[in-house]
Image: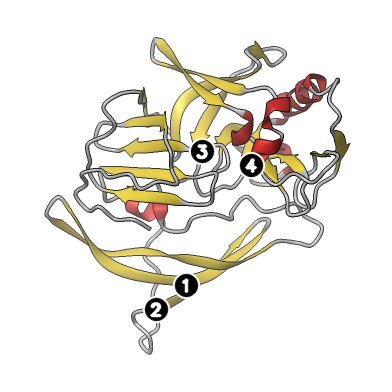
Amino acid sequence: MRRDVPGIPECSRKDPHGCHYEIKYVTGKSEGDLATDIISVIGKDKKNIAFGCGYNQEEPADAPPSSVDGILGLASFIEVTHQIKSLFSSKGKGVLYVGDFNPPSRGVTWVPMRESLFYYSPGLAELFIDKQPIRGNPTFEAVFDSGTTYTFVPAQIYNELVSKVRGTLSESSLVEVKGRALPLCWKGKRPFRSVNDVKNQFKALSLKITHASSTSNLDIPPQNYLIVEEDGKTCLAIRDASSDPVMKELNFILIGAVTMQDLFVIYNNESKQLGWVRAQCDKAQELESVIDSRL
């Protein structure tokens, strides 16, 4: 999720209320429909805020799924609101809140937002599996990106992570296979209906995030890094950043939407803070909000 959103696209005079967009990326393109509207935030009107829906994401036939698929328009709101709250549910539902609100009274992990980047970053992070650090214990900038489906980690730790995951499954009956969209998957004696059928065979991950003179942890249970494909295989929804032409240049630990499932993520631009707390994102969250928008 970037904070440097480009200018508002122009719409045809024949249809000023609906606009088509097409964006070309290194690994493919995205196209869909856009709309603009006047958004009021704390009594102030912000004109021509763009939002929309991408209905066609294309990438080369021999390429892995593009990291550009995701939510269009969320970053557009970031620049004009004090806060954005996103909730993605593992049950297929979610809520997006725009504007000031009263956050949960307890349980929120708050970290300072790094202002030196164009991205939403809580700082440097180390990756752990089953409470054990990845070999060498390297640190990388962590970035929250709700517009990217999968989580990406630098090549320096991806192979070690995969090795550790395989090690935890050494006595498991799971069989390693290649997935349709992801390179590392497993199948069981029967097709899995959901991650809940297989999550107990995997170990939890965590990120130790260093900010100022303190540290915070982002826990990543198996249901936040695994997905189940249509044919019943479970797959590692963490990818090697070096496999993506754009990501390999950034050297980030990029936290995507799968890892954000059932997390209440708060982007507070006014206080320059990021926050997160576990939540039942498939259920309505009744919060006092200036705009109280739900997409």
Do callouts 2 and 3 mark residues in contact (Cβ within 8 Å)?
no
Mark 4 = which residue?
247
Disc 3 is placed on an element classified as loop
In the rendered structure, find residue 18 and report the number of the disc placed on it. 2
- Looking at marks 1 and 2 on the same chain, the residue that comes earlier in the sequence is marked by 2
Q: CA distance from mark 4 to mark 1?
A: 26 Å
Vertical side of 163 occupied by 149: above or below? below
- The extreme bottom residue here reads 14
Q: CA distance from mark 3 to mark 4?
A: 19 Å
Foreground tag (2 vs 3):
3
Foreground tag (3 vs 1):
3
Q: Residues within 10 Å of mark 1 (few under 14, many from 20)?
A: some
**What's under tag 3, amino acid-wise?**
Met
- Looking at marks 3 and 1 on the same chain, the residue that comes earlier in the sequence is marked by 1
Which quadrant of the structure image shows residue 134? top right
Mark 1 = which residue?
33
Residue 159 relative to residue 83: left or right: right
In the rendered structure, find residue 260 and report the number of the disc placed on it. 3
